[in-house]
Image (cartoon, coloured by chain):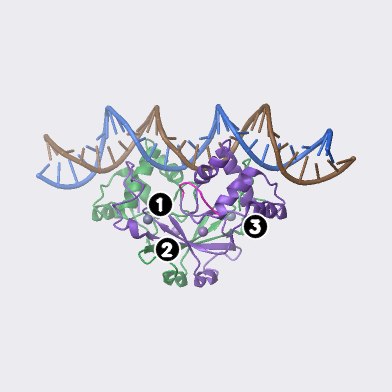
Chain colours: A purple, B green, C brown, D blue
Amino acid sequence: MKLSLEDIQHKFREYGLKSTPQRTAIYHVLIHSTAHPTAEDLFAQVSPAHPMLSLNTVYYTLSVLGTAGLVREVNVGHDRARYDANLTPHHHVICQGCQNIIDVMDPRLDCLASPSGLPHDFEITSYQVAFRGYCGTCRQPQASTTTSPTGNYPASS
Amino acid sequence: MKLSLEDIQHKFREYGLKSTPQRTAIYHVLIHSTAHPTAEDLFAQVSPAHPMLSLNTVYYTLSVLGTAGLVREVNVGHDRARYDANLTPHHHVICQGCQNIIDVMDPRLDCLASPSGLPHDFEITSYQVAFRGYCGTCRQPQASTTTSPTGNYPASS
DNA sequence: TCCTTATTAGGAACCATTCCTAATTAGCAG
DNA sequence: CTGCTAATTAGGAATGGTTCCTAATAAGGA
Ligand SMILES: [Mn+2]
Ligand SMILES: [Mn+2]
Ligand SMILES: [Zn+2]
Ligand SMILES: [Zn+2]
């Protein structure tokens, strides 16, 4: 189901959000992406059509949509944030070579029980499984990574 | 099993790592912590005994221990890195109020099958479940957070 | 004991993100 | 349609965690 810009404007009004060209364009790119883009990725993709767009607006927009529940940050590590507008419950596979993130929708993962051994007053609201490994083109962990592994510290993990 | 400083020095030699007072102290604090501390947390805890310690050394040490497989970064988001020296397979519960991280060792979580729908050539090497919610003292998501929620952007999620 | 190389400390640099501010604009009421 | 008001935007500065760079130090092996 491909949402048009009009569909998105409609959705924004349903959610009580103001509809602006920038906001619509950003969400439009994000919802039709499966790449879990960064703020800068989105900025790069929306910029051609909105030359005055500022990266700050992308961050602000993502935080507004996040608060509204239309966008989630993907939990992949402490590096830069990746965003996801796919609200159906799902999990992720992260390639440790190229950092690509693939959706996983195995229904067996959606019925994990609340874990044992928690404090009684802890209330769990969600959970997510993060699989890690190497995609076909990134095998042999130390070679052929798309982004050249610079850095003075030894690579951890 | 509480490891003494001597035990740790022994372990380092087993792993082919040089044993220095700073490195030993950092690992000693980390392995006896259940708090998944940040680099700065470790720096603060080790500093009294090693006044000349630099934060840089903490980062360097963590990266060396990470490469050796003695320490793992905990996957809790894109903010600052948290570290864990608990190598037994386990998962985490993160309080979205105070950001505390609790270990979960439910064996039911340690036998999740490889998810369906993956590219055939993707090789999964590990996975982790991240539960999120609110601890007893952080209920009512918008109130009583330990760290006051400053920031101009609306809080996402 | 001496050598070689890793480690350390300290400072600067980096960069993703947030903060600050003034101008613009969307949505609403009249 | 017109004007009001608060949200949104753009741009620039600031922040802060992490990494980079360098010279001095110290660990482990010969
Ligand atoms: Mn996803
Ligand atoms: Mn842990
Ligand atoms: Zn890959
Ligand atoms: Zn809490």
Residue B52 placement, left or right of A34: left
Q: Helix or strand or loop: what does disc 2 sit on?
A: strand
Mark 1 on the same chain as mark 3: yes
Q: Helix or strand or loop: what does disc 3 sit on?
A: loop
Classify mark 1 as within 8 Å of ligand 2 or not, answering yes or no: no
Residue C8 placement, left or right of D6: left
The local crowd at label 1, few if under 14, some if 14 to 19, many if 20 or more residues have their Cα within 10 Å, is many
Query: Looking at the picture, which amino acid does disc 2 mark?
Result: Tyr
Q: CA distance from mark 3 to mark 2?
A: 28 Å
Magenta residues span A78-84
Q: Residue at x 70, y 49 (%)?
A: A17
Query: Looking at the picture, which amino acid does disc 3 mark?
Result: Arg
Which corner quadrant of the image does residue A151 belong to?
A: top left
| Of callouts 2 and 1, the N-terminal one | 1
Q: Along the line of sight, which residue is nearer the eye, A110 or A98?
A: A98
Which residue carries the number 3 mark?
B139
CB-based contact (under 8 Å), mark 2 and mark 1:
no
Question: In the displayed structure, would residue B34 be above or below residue A116?
Answer: above
Q: Nearer the viewer, mark 1 or mark 3?
A: 3
Instruction: Write down the chain letter for disc 2.
Output: B
Q: Residue at x 42, y 57 (%)?
A: A94
Q: Residue at x 42, y 66 (%)?
A: B118
Quadrant in which the N terminus of chain B appears: bottom left
CB-based contact (under 8 Å), mark 3 and mark 2:
no
Which residue carries the number 1 mark?
B30
Which residue carries the number 2 mark?
B127
Residue B146 placement, left or right of B84: right
Q: Helix or strand or loop: what does disc 1 sit on?
A: helix
Asked if the magenta segment contains residue B12, the reply would be no
